[in-house]
Image (spheres, rainbow, N blue to C red):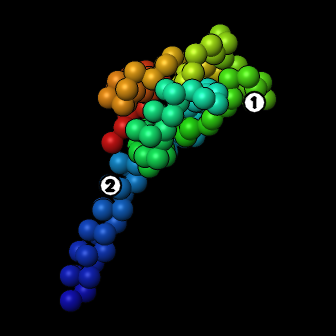
Amino acid sequence: MLAAVERTGLALRKTILALAFALLPMASAQAEGLTLFMVEQPGCIYCARWEAEVGDAYDKTAEGQAAPLQRIDLHDPLPDGVRFARKAVYTPTFVLVRAGQELERIEGYPGEGFFWGLLDVMLKNAGVTLQ
């Protein structure tokens, strides 16, 4: 009986470790301070389209966990400590930032399929492996 309990405990520990290692890439990405800024403005039809097609789901995805979304208005100043390589002109513009510095961006919204594909490339270039 004791041997069966020990085997069950060992199996449980292995399962917990496997889950922890599976989540490690997402956790390390967050630890590295990745943020996806969405530059938007009132009346932007492409911003509204992104919201309808992606917005509700984004935070629930692996991409959303790796690079949490922060929205900023096109006409507002950037948050303290954040620098873009160049000023955003189009809305929406999605800017991937690590430790306050722009890594890459998507200008405009080319549709849901293209958005996810381009974002995945940006995250991969930033060293994030999604599960």
Q: Residue at x 62, y 37 (%)?
A: 70
- What is the quadrant of residue 127 in the picture? top left
- Secondary structure of the residue carrying tag 1 is loop
The residue to which callout 2 is attached is 18
Q: In this view, does 17 lie above or below 125?
A: below
Residues at circles 1 and 2 in contact by the CB criterion of under 8 Å: no
Q: Is residue 12 above or below residue 131?
A: below
Q: Which residue is drawn at 35% across and 56% down?
A: 19
Q: Residue at x 65, y 10 (%)?
A: 86
Other-residue count near label 1 (Cα within 10 Å), few / some / many at <14 / 14–19 / ≥20? few
Spot occupied by residue 116 in the image (x, y as percentages of width and height): 37, 30
* Towards the viewer: 108 or 86: 108
* Towards the viewer: 31 or 123: 123
Other-residue count near label 2 (Cα within 10 Å), few / some / many at <14 / 14–19 / ≥20? few
Q: Is residue 50 above or below residue 107?
A: below
* Whether residue 52 is visible: yes
Of the residues under marks 1 and 2, which one precedes in the sequence? 2
**Left or right: where 119 falls relative to 42:** left
**Left or right: where 19 falls relative to 5:** right
* Whether residue 34 is visible: no
- What is the quadrant of residue 80 in the picture? top right
Three-letter amino acid code of the residue under disc 1: Pro
The residue to which callout 1 is attached is 79
Assign the C terminus to one quadrant of the image. top left
